Image (cartoon, grey):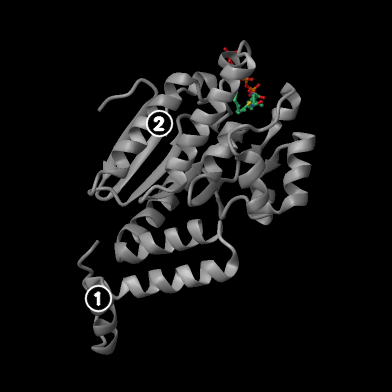
Amino acid sequence: MTYQNLLLEQSGNVITLTINRPKALNSLNPVTLQELEQAFTELNADGSVKVVILTGAGEKAFVAGGDISAMQPLDPMQARAVARQAQRLFSLIEYSPKIVIAAINGYALGGGCELAMSCDIRLAAETAKLGQPEINLGIIPGWAGTQRLPRLVGKGRAKEMMLTGDMVDAEKAEKIGLVNQTVPAQELMSVAMAMAQKIAGKPQVAVRLIKEAVDNGLEMPVDKAIDYEAELFGLCFASRDQKEGMTAFLEKRKAQWKDC
Ligand code: CO8
């Protein structure tokens, strides 16, 4: 499948998906949103893919937001439809059976920060800047930023970022938990690839169930979430890799994963 605004490159079980509109700082216009939805629908069903690295083309931006020129003329019903469309896409990413790593190579603003927050892990170049500047356009974050940001950084910091519209640099983003790790810009993709390959080499039933336990469990009351964890823990014992992992430990040898 070829796309107008996306580049896909596969290396083993890892796909690098690059949003490729550098002249508009990779901002998400309707075509790019549609293409991302199609690409993730296909990747989610592709058994050869374990991990997706999501990044932006060029050195300046991951994604500088929703495309403001496409948003400016919308009426309220159209704006609501665009909000729902991107929310659906970001949920498709958050609940993807694949692990998705955002490699934030520059500006991640507005919808770009919201996109990064829907990924499982966020790595940022030292030069990256993140923020929710929608307030400066007279709107609020509409692609689930009001919900995902406080869950990552806490209510107070999330409100401060959204109310002031100020960007945070990568170092501050790491300090407040908005990104997992900050790395020199020239090392970003190699660090992302090394992490992707490490996760792709783990027993995949356990990888999937960790993701499901965290993402679904956090939406439940804690007693129900703990019950749910026990169910998923039990399910691991139906996998060949549980037998292999424990047998290999006891036999003091390296495990040969079967469900990788
Ligand atoms: N949309 C459209 N075009 C953009 C965007 C954007 N978000 N960001 C940058 N561009 C374009 C610029 O217009 C410019 O185009 P041109 O060369 O044709 O004039 C080109 O990219 C380069 O940008 P700049 O010249 O501005 O580059 P600078 O280095 O001077 O500045 C900034 C970089 C600081 C990133 C600046 O471009 C900027 O402030 N961009 C806007 C950031 C922003 O406000 N993002 C949030 C957008 S709103 C959003 O994401 C809400 C989504 C939810 C919507 C809900 C449903 C409707």
Q: Position of residue 38 (x, y in %)?
A: 34, 30
Q: Which residue is mark 1?
A: 255
Labels 1, 2: front one: 2
Where, quadrant-wise, is the C terminus in this rendering?
bottom left
Give left or right: position of 26 versus 132.
left
Q: Position of residue 55 (x, y in %)?
A: 45, 38
Q: Is residue 254 visible?
A: no
Q: Which residue is depicted at the point 64% across and 52% down?
A: 151
Helix, strand or loop status at disc 2: helix
Q: Which residue is depicted at the point 29% across and 84% down?
A: 249
The number of discs equals 2
Q: Position of residue 239 (x, y in %)?
A: 25, 71
**Distance between the alpha carbons at the discs numbered 1 and 2:** 36 Å
Circle 1: residue type: Ala
For residue 68, what is the image quadrant?
top right
Rate crowding at label 2 as few (under 14), some (14 to 19) or many (20 or more) other CA atoms within 10 Å: many
Give left or right: position of 235 versus 33.
left
Q: Which residue is depicted at the point 51% across and 19% down?
A: 23
Give left or right: position of 151 versus 28.
right
Circle 2: residue type: Leu
Ligand 1 rendered quadrant: top right
Q: Which residue is mark 2?
A: 36
Q: Residue furthest top?
A: 73
Q: Position of residue 69 (x, y in %)?
A: 59, 13
